[in-house]
Image (cartoon, rainbow, N blue to C red):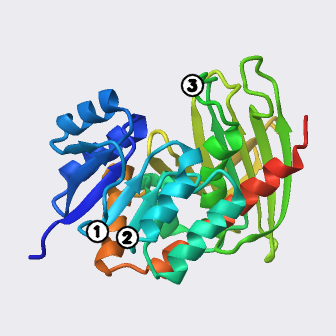
Amino acid sequence: MSRPLRIALIGAGTMGSHHARVISQSQRADLAVLVDPRKSVGAKVAERFGTEWAPELPDLSDFDGVVIAAATEAHHELAMQVLSQDTAVLIEKPVADSLLKTREIIALAEQRDLPLVCGLLERYNPAVMTARALVERPLHITATRHSPYAPRIRTGVAWDLLVHDVDLAINLIGTEPTTVDARLGFFHPDSADGAEDVAETLLGFGDGAIAHVSASRMGQRKIRQLSIHEADRLIEVDLLRRDVTVYHHVSENAVDEGRGYRQQTVIEIPELVSSQEPLTTQFSHFVDLVEGTGDAAAERATILPSHEVIDAATSSRGRS
């Protein structure tokens, strides 16, 4: 049996702590060091998960991979530093704080043929994985990701929320969109200047498929819904409850009194293909890529399309 991979983790915030837990629980990897410039935070998280703390990234010659869960504005410099040392990267979304920087990171990973995974976590939601196994030819996708306002999130909803469902729509339909129409709403008095609170996006695809993706932080409850319409089926996914329901309409007809209709629909509730936590599944996929049992080039190719859509949507700055 080969030795566990040595992994460095950058960032000891909320997501960094989750990554530290997942890496430390893995039988295929060791959390070799946790990097965070704040000793009061980093050392405490490192101690909790039985690893060393470092204020800055060490030489990576003895490491197999790096997980970057630092602030988005630090992603570009860190990723370029890691990739320049020929080390695989799992980086939280978005890859960088501009499309140009994102392209530079992906280009360097391609040039050096290194695994690069972006933390688009909903890909690994058991309900999404189940739906993907069922989908044949999606024609129309609707996705709703609404939440109550969270003051701690300073960026707009496009990069925080919308990117997940844009990524799912692109991957489910199987091609990149040819058109992007977006409207942004700026409503909350506590939001940073220019940070949108609502984003409505309509994507058009070359084969005629369309996707309507909605993100909002003006809601009063958390909603994570995905509907995949095919010619003769509807696949509904609740990403919060992690369940899938398939509907196949059979017939409808008026009732005898003529005051309504009777509908016949076959309903299926498929068994989930996995019960594993999405972050654990994502890390296992990263390990597969590092070990060479996954397709690193194919993975890299899935990252840019959703980033390009979000960049186009936010660049339009269409205000409602």
Comparing marks 3 and 2, which lies closer to the viewer? 2
Q: Residue at x 43, y 81 (%)?
A: 295
Which label's residue is closer to the chain start, 2 or 1?
1
Camera-side residue: 3 or 41?
41
Residue 224: which quarter of the image? top right
Residue pointed to by mark 2: 87
Q: Badge 2 local density, few (<14 within 10 Å), some, or many (20+)?
A: many
| Amino acid bearing label 2 | Thr
The answer for how far apart the CA atoms under marks 3 and 2 are is 32 Å
Farthest left residue in view? 1
- Name the residue tied to disc 1: 64
Q: What's under tag 3, amino acid-wise? A: Arg
Q: Relative to the observer, which residue lies in front, 252 or 54?
A: 54
Q: Evaluate whether residue 266 shows in this view.
A: no
Residue drawn at point x = 27 percent, y = 59 percent: 7
Residue 170 in percent (x, y) is at: 66, 65
Amino acid under label 1? Asp
Pick the residue in front: 7 or 217: 7
Q: What number is the disc on residue 152?
A: 3
Can residue 282 be spotted in the picture? yes
Q: Secondary structure at mark 1?
A: loop
Image quadrant occupied by the C terminus: top right
Q: Secondary structure at mark 3?
A: loop
Residues 229 and 161: in front is 161
SS label for mark 2: loop
